[in-house]
Image: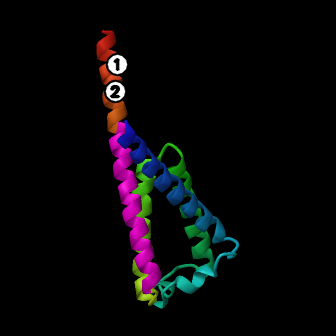
Amino acid sequence: MHREGHLDDAYWALRIGLGSTAFLAGLDKFTNLLTHWEKYLAPQVREKLPVSGTKFMYATGIVEMLVGLGILTRQTRIASYAACGWLLGIAADLILNGDYDIAARDVNMAVAAYVLARVEGSRQESRELEEESALESIA
């Protein structure tokens, strides 16, 4: 039981940390209080956008807020996989832009999101097995 408590702690730390970070970073795309987000758009990406960098960042912010809410609510597994892919895409853009240190951070966050998705999947499977076992004991 003690070991499961530690795993629960790690699970909740990842879930709250990744979910709130995604949501708050998405929200900041509308205010630029933390940073001016457009500076992270690589020129190769910016020139291919069908909209302005500002509008692209607004759309990005909406996606990030939805992913963050998904992680924090009942869609943890799928939202964590989405966050993993999203963060790897951001890291690729950052590499093109020469922001290697930030890209490395985002790759690490992508790994954390992948781990959260896998752990959530295991937790779901465990709950299903417990429910089946409980139903069998009743029957």
Quadrant in the picture for residue 65? bottom right
Residue 17 belongs to magenta span: no
Tell me which residue sits at (40%, 53%) in the image: 116
Query: In the figure, 133 relative to 55: above or below?
Result: above
Which residue in the protein does label 2 denote? 130
The spot of residue 63 in percent (x, y) is 54, 62
Which residue in the structure is indicated by mark 1? 134
Residue at the (43%, 67%) spot, across then down: 109
Residue pictured at 44% horizontal, 61% vertical: 83
Helix, strand or loop under label 1 = helix
Marker disc for residue 54:
none
Residue lying furthest top in this view? Answer: 139
Q: Residue at x 41, y 59 (%)?
A: 113
User: Which contiguous range is marked in magenta?
Assistant: 100-124
Q: Main secondary structure of the magenta part?
A: helix
Instruction: For the N terminus, give its image quadrant.
Output: top left
Q: Which amino acid is tagged 1?
A: Ala
Q: Is there any visible trace of residue 85 in the rendered image?
A: no
Q: Could you tell me the amino acid type at mark 2?
A: Glu
Colour scheme employed for the rendering of this structure: rainbow
Query: Could you tell me if residue 55 is visible in this image?
Result: yes
Q: Position of residue 57 (x, y in %)?
A: 59, 74
Query: Separation of disc 2 and disc 1 at Cα?
Result: 6 Å
Position of 17 relative to 94 (above/below): above
User: Can you say whether 100 is above or below 77 in the image?
Assistant: below
Circles 2 and 1: CB atoms closer than 8 Å = yes
Q: Residues within 10 Å of mark 1 (few under 14, many from 20)?
A: few
Q: Position of residue 30 (x, y in %)?
A: 68, 71
In the image, 45 versus 113, the foreground residue is: 113
